[in-house]
Image (tube, helix red, strand yellow):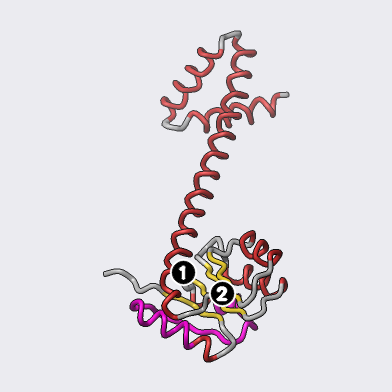
Amino acid sequence: MDKRLAIMIIEADETRAATIVDGLREAGDFEIHTVSDSAGLARRIAETRPDVVLIDLADPSRDILEELALASGPTERPVAMFVDRSDAPLTRAAIEAGVSAYVVDGLRGDRIKPILDAAIARFHMFQRMRAELAATRAALEERKIIDRAKAILMKARGIDEEAAYALLRKTAMDQGKRVAEIAQQLVMAAGLLT
């Protein structure tokens, strides 16, 4: 059985909060938490651990945006922000903070579910990109370590690059480790000897 999507709504105005709640209830079966006061927001989000955060701000300030960005953990969950007016610097700051959807003058019940879906899709897309970037950086670092280890072996043993890599690979297989681990150990040992 699938877990119900937990959504935290941050909205000080009860009427606007009710519009969001009604729009969500019409769109599906969600676990909805409404917060009207942003004081202690980080603690509330940490306790509730919502899957998605919907923020509705009539007039957002940079301070509120920074607090919400820190509290809502945009890298941990999708965040959709509804605002009443367009402001290029605040839009840019929201996107840079990781807000998945920044919607100007779009708070209507029938639009909430599509916006929520778009925010979730965009969040997952960026999560995949972050994971791919981290994996690429890790692979590059491993490649650098392996190249350093090969250079050490080539100098110490007077062998060519292919033979150095073959030696690293054989040692890794013999020890049941990855080539990068053996290379890291060799680089560290060589560092101690110099």
Residue pointed to by mark 2 = 82
* Rendered residue at 69%/28% (across/down): 191
Report helix, strand or loop for mark 2.
strand
101 displayed left or right of 39 = left
Quarter residue 102 falls in: bottom right
Judge whether residue 128 is colored magenta: no
Query: Which segment is the magenta one?
Result: 18-45
Reading the image, the residue beneath label 1 is 115
Q: Residue furthest left?
A: 1
Q: What percent of the width, then of the height, locates residue 97?
A: 63, 62
**Quadrant assignment for the C terminus:** top right
Q: Is residue 170 left or right of residue 61?
A: left
Q: Amino acid at mark 1?
A: Ile
Q: Is residue 10 above or below residue 90?
A: below
Nearer to the camera, 116 or 9: 116
Q: Quadrant of the N terminus?
A: bottom left
Residue 64 position (above or below residue 35):
above
Residue positioned 55% across, 60% down in the render: 75
